[in-house]
Amino acid sequence: MPIDVRTALTAPPRTAGISWTAKDVILYHLGVGAGGSAATDPAELRYTLETRLHVLPGFAAVAGAGSPGVTAALTMPGIDVDLARALHAGQSLTLHRPLPPEGAATTTARIDAVYDKGNAAVLVMRTEAADADGPLWTDEAWVHLRGEGGWGGDRGPSVRPVPETGRPDRTVERTVREDQALLYRLSGDWNPLHADPEFARRAGFDRPVLHGLCTYGMTLKAVVDTLLDGDVTRVRSCATRFTGIVHPGETLRIRMWRRDGEVRATVTAVDRDDAPVLDGMTVAHA
């Protein structure tokens, strides 16, 4: 079996040193749509101008230009799976304090769980980051591996988010640029699924698709900009499930509901009759 569950769960954590600059943060922000058609708007300049820089928490997923999400999980001990079989299924991030525009940290990563879904396996990779002043963030990437289940292991949680009811407090639309995946991948996610048509077809898609973490970042930015007064430091955590793909060039419809101490959001693809893309996003905030 390509997944050696015992090895994956008992391997020592992988530790690495990372660093980043304001240039890395700005590149990430551009990759999730900052600037756009309002490049000189003061609300956008806080993401793109180094003298005013506020860091979107989603930057943690690519800080240090490491291999985020899917790619990193497949390099862990006990995991030997073709990248074309892997999809990003979910992501959660907890911020222990606001991210600085420039910094250095030590990350510690490990496979926290391996679930047997029958026709697939799901890996949960947990990464913690800390600098000289203490913990910075903790994130978990859930990676779906097609055709890798069926060994009789723990199926894991199957809780689905309760659908939101009632009119959203805010609904916005964001257009994905044709070259957005090419720009986003410069922040460190080099998975060819998002750039190479031949690889995309081998993975079961008719053309390259947008990174799930790019959609995640775009959605988090929309929540911050519209319901959190543009204040990135109010975000405490953000978790979501990826329920569908996004093609570059499409328009995303982001619906948001205010709840006690959090914002919940869903994302659909306008061009495909509101096909679900991201579901159950919960942004806890101050």
Image (spheres, rainbow, N blue to C red):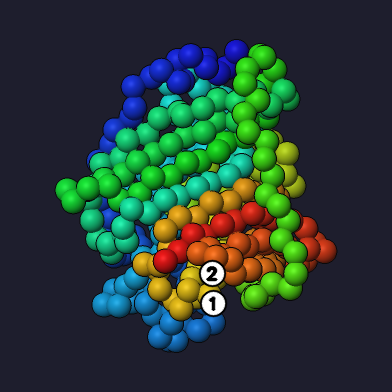
- Is 284 positioned to the left or the right of 133 in the image? right
Q: Report crowding for label 2: few under 14, some 14 to 19, many 20 or more residues within 10 A (C-alpha).
A: many
According to the image, label 2 marks what residue?
A: 223
Q: Is residue 249 visible?
A: no
Front-lying residue, 277 or 49 = 277
**Amino acid type shown at disc 1:** Thr
| Quadrant (top left/top right/bottom left/bottom right) for the N terminus | top right
The kind of secondary structure element at disc 1 is: helix
* Badge 2 amino acid: Val
Residue 249 in the image, given as x and y percentages of width and height: 67, 66
Considering every residue shown, the one lying at the far right of the view is 273
How far from the left and from the top, in percent, is residue 192? 56, 43
Residue 83 coordinates in the image, percent (x, y): 57, 33
- Label 2, secondary structure: give it: helix
- The residue at the point 48 percent across, 74 percent down is 228
Front residue of 46 and 224? 224
Decide: is 129 above or below 80.
below
Would you say 126 lies left or right of 245 here? left
Query: Which one is in front, 234 or 115?
Result: 234
From the top left corner, tell me how far across and down residue 137 is, in percent: 35, 49
Query: Which residue occupies 50% across, 84% down?
Result: 38
Do the residues bearing badges 2 and 1 touch, measured as CB atoms within 8 Å? yes
Residue 210 image label: none
**Quarter-of-image position of residue 222:** bottom right
User: Callout 1: 10 Å neighbours few (<14), some, many (20+)?
Assistant: some
Mark 2 vs mark 1, CA separation in Å: 5 Å
Residue 226 circle label: 1
